[in-house]
Image (tube, rainbow, N blue to C red):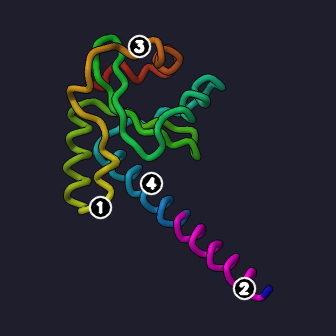
Amino acid sequence: MKKLPSKFHFLSGVALLALIVGCATTKHTESLLSEAGFLHVPATTDKQAQHLMSLPKDKVTIARINGRAFYVFPDPTHKLLYVGNSEQFQTYQQLLTYSQLEGNSRVLAVEDDGPGDDTAKWVEWTNTSGWTHGTE
């Protein structure tokens, strides 16, 4: 039975290390996004909070609203959405390159992400926060 506690301690240590590394990487991404000029938009309604939780974690993705592309990064811990335009996303990519962060796989957004408009999916955010005005 002595092996069980040592395996448990080992697995607990690995899980804790993964959590610490994940949090540090997310903090780094948030810092770079802020430096690139992304807006911090708080989730102020239950619907926004639910939508925030449904977005891919630790990924910058494209939100297409009324024909315009916005780049979004969820921060569910702080109930925030980082929102930027094309220019800010390019600045973020440059900052990411300069920092030599190994997590370049986080950059999922591409300029030509296919046809379509996500306006209906984002209406709860755009009606209450106004971030679609003045970010491009």
Q: Residue at x 80, y 85 (%)?
A: 1
Q: Circle 4 — which element?
A: helix
Q: Amino acid at mark 3?
A: Thr
> Percent position (x, y) of residue 128?
52, 18
For label 1, the residue is 102
Q: Amino acid at mark 2?
A: Lys
Q: Circle 1 — which element?
A: loop
Q: Residues within 10 Å of mark 1 (few under 14, many from 20)?
A: few
Cα gap from disc 2 to disc 1, whole angstroms:
35 Å
Does 132 sit above or below residue 55? above
Q: Residue at x 65, y 72 (%)?
A: 12
Q: Amino acid at mark 1?
A: Glu
Q: Quadrant of residue 63?
A: top left
Q: Quadrant of residue 84?
A: top left
Q: Which residues are magenta?
A: 2-18
For label 3, the residue is 119
Q: Amino acid at mark 4?
A: Thr
Q: Disc 1 vs disc 3: which is toward the camera?
A: 1
Cα gap from disc 1 to disc 4, whole angstroms:
13 Å
Q: Quadrant of residue 51?
A: top right
Is residue 87 shown left or right of residue 101? left
For label 2, the residue is 3
- Give the mark nearer the N terminus: 3 vs 4: 4
Q: In the current view of this chain or complex, which residue is farthest to the right? A: 1
Quarter of the figure that contains the C terminus: top left
- Give the mark nearer the N terminus: 2 vs 1: 2
